[in-house]
Amino acid sequence: MWERTLQDLIRGLRANKKDESKFIAKAVDEIRKEIKSEDMELKAGAVLKLTYLDMMGYDMTWASFHVVEVMSSAKFHLKSVGYLAAVQSFDQETDVLMLTTNLLKKDLTSTPAEIAITLNGLSHIVTPDLARDISPELITMLTHSRAQIRKRAILALYKVMVQYPEALQQGVTRLKEKLDDPDPGVVASTVNVLCELARRKPEEYLTLAPQLFHLLTTSTNNWMLIKIIKLFGSLSPYEPRLVRKLQPPITELISTTPAISLLYECVHTCIIGGMLQGPSGDSLARMCVSKLAAFIQDADQNLKYIALLALVKIVPSHPHLVAEYQDTILASVNDQDISIRMRALDLVSAMVTPNSLQSIVQQVLSHLVPDTSSSTLPTATQSLAQHTVPTSPTTAKPHISPAQSPAYRLVLSQRILNICSQSMYENVTNFEWYLSVLVDLAHVANVDIGLQIRDQLVDVVGRVKGVRRYAVKLMYTLLCDDTMLHNARDEGSCSEVLWAAAWICGEYCSELSEPHKLLPYLLQPEVANLLPEIIAVYIQATSKIFGHWAAEVAQRWDDDDLPEVKSMVDVIVGGVHEFVSNTHIEVQERAANTLQLFTFIQADLNAYRPKPIDNPFAEASSSFDPIASGEPRFPKSLYLLQPLHEAYELNPVALAAQASVPIPDGLDLDAWIVAPPQEPVLEVDAEAKARKVKKGKGKEVNGTKSKSGKKKHKEEVNGGNGVLLTPLEDDTETPEERMQRLAERRERLREDPYYIIDDRPSTSRVDDLDSIPVVRLEGMPSPAPEVDDSHMLPSLRSDYTPSSFAIDRDGEMPEGAVVPSRTITPVPRESRASTPMMTSFPQYEVADEGRTSTPEPIKVTRPKKKTPGKKKRTQNSSTLPDASNP
Amino acid sequence: MIHAVLIFNTSGVARLTKFYTPLHQSSQTLIPKIFSLICSRPASLCNFLDAPELEAFLGPKGEEDERWRVVYRSYATLYFVFVVDGAESELGILDLIQVFVESLDRAFENVCELDLVFQFDEVHHILAEIIQGGLVLETNVEEIDNSVQVSAKLRKESFASANPLSLGIGGVGGAGSRGGNLKSPLGWLTGKITGGRAM
């Protein structure tokens, strides 16, 4: 009699707030005793207390058997406790569930009240096994005399059908009948279940359309109408006739219903149900968008939110309609409510076009800018002021904290990167602008997005040759600016951008007029603050830049240059020396390598003695021509580094490049490198051997591997004792034989777990190298002419070159790449001049009269391969049209 | 479908948790997360909670899957939170929360937080009359109230028949005086009984 009730437990919890865990531990001990009691009341009390504790996060799975005991009590009030505990604590893995089958069956034949709690409980705890066993009883329940029970049975049937799809067919048939049930509540529940089912497999519920349509036009229950409308939203994409049928009543509902929720669902269904196509759809679309636009401007924030949700879905089909409200939508990105901001961001990203990109990105970027520093914000925001849509001056910058939460800032930053880079920079028309946005983002983001920015920078500069000159200048200023260097170790400093800066300046240092001036910045002591990976790139860039500069100096050598070169080498040796003992292995190795190279250069420079112009010895060896003597006038070591870095250009690599590398003649990738040990063959019976070989390559042990393998196998199958085949046979093989052999081999390998079979059609056709068209990509022939734009710093970005940029969208393919024939078809030599460019940039489809300063796109030529072996590199390039742009 | 119904107070203490779909992350981390996001939102903002921090919990798990939505309303010291998917109408769920609260109000007569604390099983029973297995069962407050009363009455009768002596300790339950709201003649009596259900 003195056991604690649930109320006592709760009161105790409230009284022991300070020492809750101790109190609970004690309570659970008591519960463990009580729950084993013979007294069902006591047991149920213990279970109820446990259920309460479960809500607070304390485990009660250990008591699941006792829960079943309480469920099986004959007393209704105890049974309710049992079912409640089961609903709250059981899951699919609860093993005692298998004990409940008969209990549930029995309870389903009991009083209506018990049936109700049983059906409710079943909806939660049903497993595939339970569903299978209980579905017959449940289906008979659908015709129960009480509407209350029929409703519950219908909802429970949904859960059963989800767990046990075999019940679907019968269940759905019965559900259809329930659409005509006299009780409106039962019909509503049926619609509810059908709505869920149709979301999973819409095409199977199209036959219900007439009945549902009847309900749509006759019912006045808004709850049900909403569900019917939603249901039609799932169905109509699968049945075009339904769209025509639905348009009138839905249009009617939209114009007449006073219920905003129903109105909204109608609009939403029109959008997702594909009802806005065609001539009649257009006016409906206009109506929908105007309704939604009214919602956005409504004072009710909820309407604003859902309107944004729906507009996102209409943008792909009717961008022009939504664009009319662009200003309102952009203002929503500025809303004080973060929920609305998130949806507005989604919408804005969907609305981006090449024309609107800059203003939208500018708007999003401005949210990242702290209010106080808006005046000192260096770059894009100011310079873009001229193209931006005027932001409404009344919108005060929100001061609430969520807008500045790191997670939100991260979302904003990622969004900027995504909308700019989507579909391979589809919407970016000005890459100089984009680079400056990236740099600005790195400055203002204040969240951990440096890596993504870094990758974007490198990717853009790699793909868009026209922007490299600008990029190098921008990166130069970034490297000279030491604020980022100082804050490198702070969270959200985006110091990874310096990785990109150093890499770009190193790789494209030829675009710099005085590259050596950057070297001291790359070697300043603060660099040690950076992450090791960045330091490694700094060291590498140092070597690249010096290599380029030194070669330049050597070309126009003047003995007066010597002190400058010497001091530069000293600076480098001194700077790099700091990192030789770095604990990071990559930094250490690069530093050590670089140090050795520069020590060598240093020694060479120190040994260098200027050769006077009128060299007295020159007469002796070879008069008048000092070069011919083989002794250049500059220190030779100045040319040491350049070839290391500049021998080949780095290009973006196409996704399919690796797979398209042709296999050189004479290389058989399937040949054993080391043959597996010979298995003892007891009987040298020809037939047996043939069978054995057929089983798989692994068994093949003969010395004549490689190409003859299949051939041999074939011989063996055909002729019996064909052990003496030699590789010479290959040469006489006809293409048909070869194809057949390859097909057989593929068939065998398919079974072999150690081979990954590539089933793409391309591979089946690429084996005959000689008959394949070759795609060749060429680099840019002419670099952009020098423009004196040294003044072009980010703050002066209004000087953007108005020209457009060529993007290397596809990337480089290996020489002699084998491209699947479905994408590239052989083009006769004569028509090559009209070969379309691989890039889909429209500007380049028209051949212009003269070459301009902008770079040319990658050219694709498809010469018909005539001779095997060496590829002809340059032969065809001159016959291509001069693709350039105004 | 409705995936979860949560009630917690303005201090973040859970008063009711009901998950209709097993969570891929523990409910014990979801509730504090939702609470921390909701409690910082002024009342003037919309009733849909959408935040980057929630993506891990509610973001789409498959290609076609829509992200779940958190719809909430606050009443006095309590937040009522529904987690739903795209099959539910957002505005409809707002109405449904209202239906739920009205039903509680009818059952408890001017419901307050303490009612939910001390009669959390009753709250579950009421919710079970509105939502079953994540699908809406009934939206009419009258109907719900009737069903709640009928089943409450049955539980009380069952309890009374099993505990003939329980009248003596009827007043023990803290919320006993508020528990009975039956229109039946026995209402006042059975109300006292349930309040002090001695288990």
Image: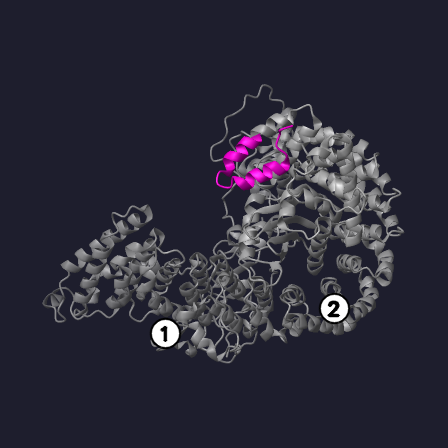
Which numbered circle lies on residue A793? 1
- The residue that label 2 is drawn on is A276
- N-terminal of the pair, mark 2 or mark 1, is 2
Residue A680, located in which quarter of the rendered image? top right
Residue A292 left/right relative to A794: right
Residue A59 is situated, as x and y percent measured from the top left of the image, at 58, 35
Which numbered circle lies on residue A826? none
Q: Residue at x 51, y 71 (%)?
A: A363
Chain for numbered disc 2: A
Residues A635 and A840: in front is A840
Spatial separation of the CA atoms under disc 2 and disc 1: 49 Å
Q: Are marks 2 and 1 in contact (CB under 8 Å)?
A: no
> Farthest residue toward the front?
B168
Q: Is residue A17 above or below residue A95?
A: below
In this rendering, does residue A594 appear at all?
Answer: yes
Residues A423 and A552: in front is A423
The main secondary structure of the magenta stretch is helix
Q: Amino acid at mark 1?
A: Leu
Residues A799 and A607: in front is A799
Q: Residue at x 25, y 60 (%)?
A: A524
Residue A768 is situated, as x and y percent measured from the top left of the image, at 58, 50
Q: Residue at x 70, y 52 (%)?
A: B105
Q: Amino acid at mark 2?
A: Leu
Q: Secondary structure beneath disc 1?
A: loop
Residue A324, located in which quarter of the rendered image? bottom right
Q: Secondary structure beneath disc 2?
A: loop
Residue A689 is situated, as x and y percent measured from the top left of the image, at 62, 26
Residue A506 left/right relative to A798: left
